Amino acid sequence: MIIKLWQNQPDSQWQNLHRGDMYAATIPFLENWLSPAREAIAQTLGVSHPPDYPDSAHPDFFNKIQKARDLIKKDRRIYTGVAHLLEGLNLRPQDFYFDAVRLRAIAPGLEHIPDASMAFTWHRDMWYANPHCQINLWIPVFDVAKEASMGILPDNWQKYVPNNSELFDYERWCEQGGFQSLGTHPKLFPSVTEPLDFNSLIRPALPAGQLLAFSPAHLHCTLPNRTSQIRYTLEVRLVHLDDLQNHVTQNVSDDNSTGSTLYDFFHCQTFSRIPHQLITSYLRATR
């Protein structure tokens, strides 16, 4: 499967994302939007460009990354900028809700650190109680080389994959610290339970200033970083109001997680939550 270029046909391309297409898009506003993330990285790690990685086994590495994440979470420019990102894709921000913007920092060798190793598992986001109509935006803070990128297995699109998602409960996950926490409670990271075929593996290489849009129904994974620099990316998870109202799903038959992240989504302009009755209606129809 080839990653396509986002054209000026947002409605049809949005529907195609739900059919498994993946798109790379160049948005001039991205450079502006990335500034707070770069500032947070510079403030906490003391660098303003992609650095050679520090010792990821050192406790300060996790603490500094967590501080950078906290700075990003508190920066209003990041959250008000999501609407401008959508406008750059010729989408209407008033039609969208989004989850918390997350910073990922993948250093070479991180997969060997016990506290981080479970993040290197093949999964669909649905197995983490993400909505089936969600679309992901994967955004490099600095250029990402193929050898540092994540992996996607498009041949597994809508193909049943044995997994342990039945053990995942989102409420319990949040009680244990939630996403990207440094809590002391061991958490279940749902993942595949049988060997995979890697013939269709894609590792997208993207420069800063581009983003990758794809369905979280794609089987994907954080892969080991084989470069000498930390890979920094931001992630935005979106749902469209019409998709919620029309009960759009990805026909994923292997999701057995419980709970839903939909209760955590914000409107792209008003920052209000999704009405509970809409969430309830959507979950009843799709789970």
Image (cartoon, rainbow, N blue to C red):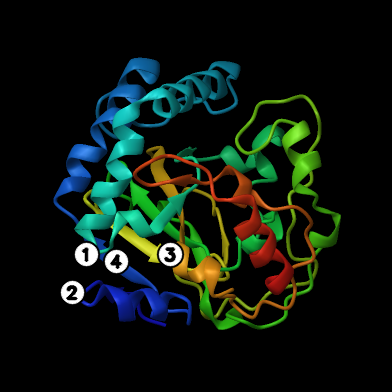
Q: Upstream in the sequence, badge 4 or badge 2?
A: 2
**What amino acid is found at the position of numbered circle 4 in the picture?**
Ala
**Label 2 – label 1 distance at C-alpha:** 7 Å
**Label 1 – label 4 distance at C-alpha:** 14 Å
- Tell me the residue that label 3 is attached to: 203
Q: Upstream in the sequence, badge 3 or badge 2?
A: 2
- Tell me the residue that label 2 is attached to: 8
Please tell me whether mark 4 or mark 3 is closer to you in this view.
4
Residue 257, by quadrant, is bottom right
Q: Is residue 1 left or right of residue 251?
A: left
Q: Upstream in the sequence, badge 3 or badge 1?
A: 1
Please tell me whether mark 1 or mark 4 is closer to you in this view.
1
Q: Nearer the viewer, residue 90 or 39?
A: 90
Q: Nearer the viewer, residue 106 or 40?
A: 40
Q: Secondary structure at mark 1?
A: loop
Please tell me whether mark 3 or mark 1 is closer to you in this view.
1
**Label 3 – label 2 distance at C-alpha:** 25 Å
> Do the residues bearing badges 2 and 1 touch, measured as CB atoms within 8 Å?
yes
Q: Secondary structure at mark 2?
A: loop
**What amino acid is found at the position of numbered circle 3 in the picture?**
Arg
Which residue appears at 28% of the width and 24% of the height? 39
Please tell me whether mark 3 or mark 2 is closer to you in this view.
2
Task: Kindly tell me whether residue 173 is visible in this rendering.
Answer: yes
**What amino acid is found at the position of numbered circle 1 in the picture?**
Asn
Which residue appears at 29% of the width and 31% of the height? 77
- Tell me the residue that label 1 is attached to: 90
**Label 3 – label 1 distance at C-alpha:** 26 Å
Q: Nearer the viewer, residue 184 or 49?
A: 184
- Tell me the residue that label 4 is attached to: 24
Task: Kindly tell me whether residue 123 is visible in this rendering.
Answer: no
Residue 173, by quadrant, is top right
Query: Which quadrant would the N terminus be assigned to in this image?
Result: bottom left
